[in-house]
Amino acid sequence: MIILQIEHPVPDFEGWKKAFENDPMDRAASGVKSHRVSRLSDNPNYVIIELEFVDINEAAAMLGRLQSLWKKVDGKVMTDPKTKMFEVVDSKIY
């Protein structure tokens, strides 16, 4: 499993969440199998998103599309996104 992790501050969490829920990237059609949204406990306007993929090429394509979108909304919905892509090699639910 491949995880595309994105983190960035948002000026207004509820406004950002609404934009995220509108799904402008069509996550399912882009290969996203699941997603997780978190925010810092000491800063609710800092979000961390994890998008799960099976295929690294789909994850890379999504990142490229997101980078194009961010250029249009930077400073309005979010700022200064940071990304990481990694492979999950072990996982267990307790």
Image (tube, rainbow, N blue to C red):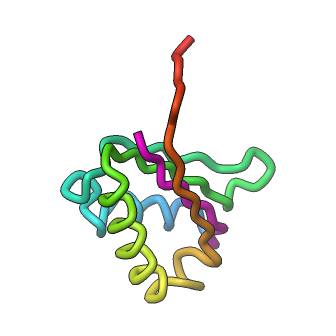
Q: Is residue 66 left or right of residue 8?
A: left
Tell me which corner region of the image, top left, top right, bottom left or bottom right, holds residue 45: bottom right
Residue 38 position in % (x across, y down)? 59, 46
In the rendered image, residue 5 lying in the magenta stretch gets the answer: yes
Identify which residue is drawn at 29% across, 56% down.
27
Q: What is the residue that sits farthest to the top in this orientation?
A: 94
Q: Nearer the viewer, residue 65 or 76?
A: 65
Q: Nearer the viewer, residue 2 or 42?
A: 2
Tell me which corner region of the image, top left, top right, bottom left or bottom right, holds residue 34: top left
Q: Main secondary structure of the magenta part?
A: strand
Identify which residue is drawn at 53% across, 18% down.
92
In the rendered image, residue 59 lying in the magenta stretch gets the answer: no
**Quick check: 41 above or below 10?**
above
Q: What is the residue that sits farthest to the left in this orientation?
A: 29
Residue 51 position in % (x across, y down)? 43, 50
Residue 50 position in % (x across, y down)? 50, 49
Give, as a single range, the part of the protein colored magenta.
Answer: 1-11
Residue 71 position in % (x across, y down)? 48, 87
The C terminus appears in which quarter of the rendering?
top right
Task: Report the number of discs.
Answer: 0
Q: What is the residue that sits farthest to the right in this orientation?
A: 42
Identify which residue is drawn at 39% across, 65% down.
60
**Quick check: 63 above or below 56?**
below
The N terminus appears in which quarter of the rendering?
top left
